[in-house]
């Protein structure tokens, strides 16, 4: 499957090669090595290079001969940051999604978001007008807000908590749109963490999906999405909102009385499976990259890796 995906992306890779200077690491090999890092929970590039030194199966998958030298971990990281970007991650995701033809529903979907802890400590969250060098200090009792404070380590991270009673952490939000047949990811993106980001990202993903689909689709979601702005906008997109109802919310009997509404709610748990895999097996429990662009790249790429794991298993079950 990876061979087919990378073959379809050969034109995208042609523009990444430099015509001068030292030859860089081939993008195909970079992607293969990064897939191994996600599949096997290798927590750093240094350990990945160590594995490639002695693991013959890893070498075979990446495309290294038995006597080929393995790259330095710093060179590998530098090439990853230079060559791999958000557009390439979305292209890779789209080619993987194309491999799932016949396994994905084209009518019924569920959307949700998850908190991705940033690679920044609480003590780095300082007042924006504080010019004092270094981090740290006692912030207990101090009112800290994203409007007045920012992390000196990762300025794009935001202090956020997903629900009441939880600890606020410097975070990003990862969003997925999952189809309701087998739980494969149909769309993914990352945003800065705030109270409206989940709904805004859902609208963006649904808008892109409706451009590809001809018929009407349904979108399930939890109670946080039951607001009048979101529900009305979703309906304008030609999507039926199967959002869990809350008191004085926007969902009424016009929607909830249909049998399909209850079916969508019963399938809503499928959206949690990718989040569990991405955080337990993948590299997203606490992301080790800084900046929204890099975190978005890693999140979308990891979602493609999740689909790569699932598609062969689903094909075997349906055979």
Image (tube, helix red, strand yellow):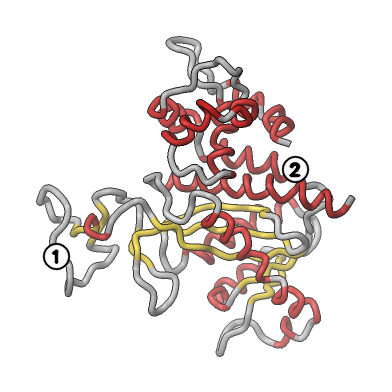
Q: Along the line of sight, which residue is nearer the eye, 215 or 298?
A: 298
Res 88 quadrant in image? top right
Image height check: is 56 above or below 155? above
What residue do we see at 62% from left, 38% from top? 91
What residue do we see at 44% from left, 75% from top? 163
Quarter of the picture containing the N terminus is top right
- Disc 2 vs disc 1: which is toward the camera? 1
Marks 2/1: CA–CA distance: 52 Å
User: Mark 1 Cα within 10 Å, few/some/many (few <14, many 20+)?
Assistant: few
Q: Along the line of sight, which residue is nearer the eye, 130 or 170?
A: 170
Q: Report x, y in % for residue 44.
A: 43, 40
Name the residue beneath numbered marker 1: 138
Drawn side of residue 222 relative to residue 159, left or right: right
| Extreme residue in the front direction | 54
What residue do we see at 51% from left, 63% from top? 114
Please tell me whether mark 1 sits on a helix, a strand or a loop.
loop
Drawn side of residue 214 relative to residue 145, left or right: right
Let me know if residue 14 appears in the view: yes
Image height check: is 194 above or below 314? below
Q: Report x, y in % for residue 152.
A: 24, 50
Name the residue beneath numbered marker 2: 98
User: Mark 2 Cα within 10 Å, few/some/many (few <14, many 20+)?
Assistant: few
Res 130 quadrant in image? bottom left
Drawn side of residue 209 relative to residue 25, left or right: right
Let me know if residue 28 appears in the view: no
Residue 156 image label? none
Q: Along the line of sight, which residue is nearer the eye, 150 or 34?
A: 34
Drawn side of residue 143 relative to residue 108, left or right: left
Q: Report x, y in % for residue 183.
A: 71, 60
What residue do we see at 55% from left, 58% from top? 175
Q: Report x, y in % for residue 62.
A: 60, 27
């Amino acid at each position: 499957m990876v061979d087919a995906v990378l073959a379809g992306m050969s034109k995208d890779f042609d523009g990444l090669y430099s015509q001068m200077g030292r030859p860089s690491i081939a993008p195909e090999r970079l992607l293969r090595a990064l897939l191994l890092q996600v599949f096997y929970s290798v927590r750093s590039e240094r350990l990945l290079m160590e594995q490639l030194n002695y693991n013959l199966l890893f070498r075979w998958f990446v495309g290294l001969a038995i006597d080929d030298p393995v790259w330095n971990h710093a060179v590998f990281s530098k090439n990853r940051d230079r060559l791999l970007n958000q557009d390439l991650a979305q292209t890779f995701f789209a080619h993987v999604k194309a491999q799932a033809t016949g396994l994905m529903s084209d009518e019924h979907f569920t959307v949700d978001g998850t908190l991705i802890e940033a690679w920044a400590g609480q003590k780095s969250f300082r007042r924006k007008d504080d010019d004092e060098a270094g981090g740290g200090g006692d912030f207990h009792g101090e009112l800290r807000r994203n409007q007045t404070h920012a992390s000196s380590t990762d300025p794009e991270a935001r202090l956020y908590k997903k629900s009441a009673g939880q600890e606020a952490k410097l975070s990003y939000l990862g969003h997925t749109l999952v189809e309701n047949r087998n739980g494969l990811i149909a769309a993914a993106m990352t945003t800065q963490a705030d109270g409206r980001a989940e709904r805004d990202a859902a609208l963006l993903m649904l808008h892109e999906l409706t451009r590809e689909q001809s018929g009407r689709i349904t979108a399930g979601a939890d109670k946080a999405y039951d607001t009048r702005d979101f529900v009305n906008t979703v309906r304008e997109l030609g999507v039926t909102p199967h959002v869990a109802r809350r008191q004085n919310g926007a969902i009424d009997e016009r929607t909830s009385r249909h049998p399909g509404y209850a079916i969508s709610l019963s399938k809503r748990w499928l959206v949690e499976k990718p989040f569990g895999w991405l955080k337990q097996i993948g590299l997203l429990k606490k992301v080790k990259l800084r900046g929204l662009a890099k975190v978005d790249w890693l999140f979308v790429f990891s979602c493609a890796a999740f689909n790569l794991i699932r598609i062969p298993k689903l094909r075997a079950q349906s055979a």
